[in-house]
Image (tube, rainbow, N blue to C red):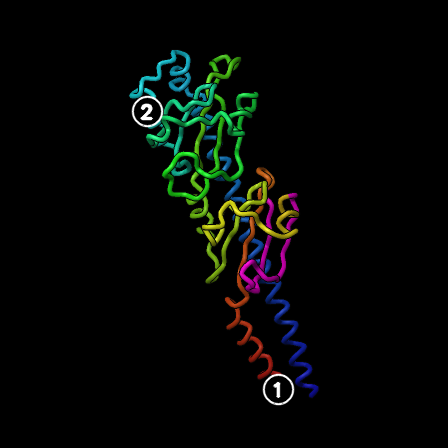
């Protein structure tokens, strides 16, 4: 009985150490994931800001020369060099009416973004605006949600805003980039915007759905967590919550305990055999 007690104690200690190790490794993945999201957003912002100051774009507005061929050519040049960040780029006048988009869609001809927050903010003098997750306004768009980045188009002397440039960010590309960080078996990331809505989530039907729990709320306020708990599907998982302070978002890295069941069985059996 003494040997069994020693075996049980050692098993508990080893399992605790293994659990801490798994949470530490998951924490590293969460750190890497949050850093990657931050980098991709900053890089996309830098690219669209540079384009908003491009003289060929400013000239279109200065001359009010919105010839379809010229406008499309200016947009297409940037779109082709902007990597895979944007689903669509477009610019509007100061009434929020669409002028040109790339890739083009006929629905864009009737686009009016005057009621969108990002348009209002830019018109009121903001130098850049990143939205929360939004339902696409131009259909058909094969994505459940988008983010929009918008800088103003200003005269060369920066004294007057003359238009608004906007880019719809590709969340699928963001998710694909995240999963370059490899998990064991069934690990996953979730990304939540500043309003607490899912941007990246296992159930695509719940994109833009509200996340639950005080852990998410605290994470959006900058707090970080690591724990073993049940997820939304009732599965026991390791979880690490990581803040992305630059945009007020949160990221969760999650790994089911079942992925490590075999490891725990082998460790437990080895200890008991060694002791007994």
Badge count: 2
- Direction from residue 64 to residue 215 in the image, left or right: right
Q: In the image, what residue occupies the spot 48% across and 34% down?
A: 148
Numbered badge on residue 100: none
* Image depth: mark 1 or mark 2 in front: 2
Identify the residue position indicated by label 1 in the image.
276
Quadrant that contains the N terminus: bottom right
First-in-chain label (1 vs 2): 2
Q: In the image, what residue occupies the spot 46% across and 56% down?
A: 182
Identify the residue position indicated by label 2 in the image.
72
Q: Is residue 104 visible?
A: no
Q: Residue furthest front?
A: 110
Is 238 contained in the magenta span? yes
Give, as a single range, the part of the protein colored magenta: 221-244
x then y, percent, for residue 83 = 38, 36
| Label 1 packing within 10 angstroms: few (<14), some (14-19), many (20+) | few
Q: Residue furthest left?
A: 69
- Specify the quadrant of the image occupied by residue 62: top left
Q: In the image, what residue occupies the spot 45% across and 21% down?
A: 53
x then y, percent, for residue 73 = 31, 24
Q: Is residue 175 above or below residue 230?
A: above
């Amino acid at each position: 009985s003494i040997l069994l007690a020693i075996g049980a104690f050692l098993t508990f200690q080893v399992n605790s150490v293994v659990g801490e190790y798994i949470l530490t490794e998951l924490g590293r993945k969460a750190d890497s994931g949050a850093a990657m999201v931050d980098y991709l957003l900053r890089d996309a912002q830098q690219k669209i800001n540079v384009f908003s100051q491009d003289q060929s774009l400013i000239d279109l507005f200065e001359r009010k020369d919105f010839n379809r061929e010229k406008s499309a050519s200016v947009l297409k040049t940037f779109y082709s060099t902007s990597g895979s960040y944007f689903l669509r780029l477009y610019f509007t006048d100061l009434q929020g009416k669409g002028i040109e988009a790339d890739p083009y869609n006929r629905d864009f001809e009737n686009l009016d973004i005057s009621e969108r927050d990002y348009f209002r903010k830019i018109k009121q003098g903001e130098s850049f605006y990143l939205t929360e997750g939004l339902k696409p306004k131009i259909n058909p768009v094969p994505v459940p949600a988008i983010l929009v980045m918008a800088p103003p188009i200003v005269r060369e002397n920066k004294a007057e805003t003359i238009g608004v440039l906007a880019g719809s960010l590709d969340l699928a590309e963001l998710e694909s980039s995240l999963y370059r960080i490899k998990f064991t078996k069934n690990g996953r990331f979730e990304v939540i915007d500043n309003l607490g809505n899912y941007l990246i989530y296992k159930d695509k039907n719940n994109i833009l759905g509200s996340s639950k729990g005080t852990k998410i709320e605290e994470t959006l306020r900058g707090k970080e967590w690591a724990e073993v708990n049940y997820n939304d599907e009732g599965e026991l998982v390791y979880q690490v919550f990581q803040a992305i302070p630059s945009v007020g978002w949160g990221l969760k890295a999650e790994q089911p305990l079942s992925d490590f069941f075999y490891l725990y069985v082998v460790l437990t059996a080895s200890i008991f055999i060694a002791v007994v």
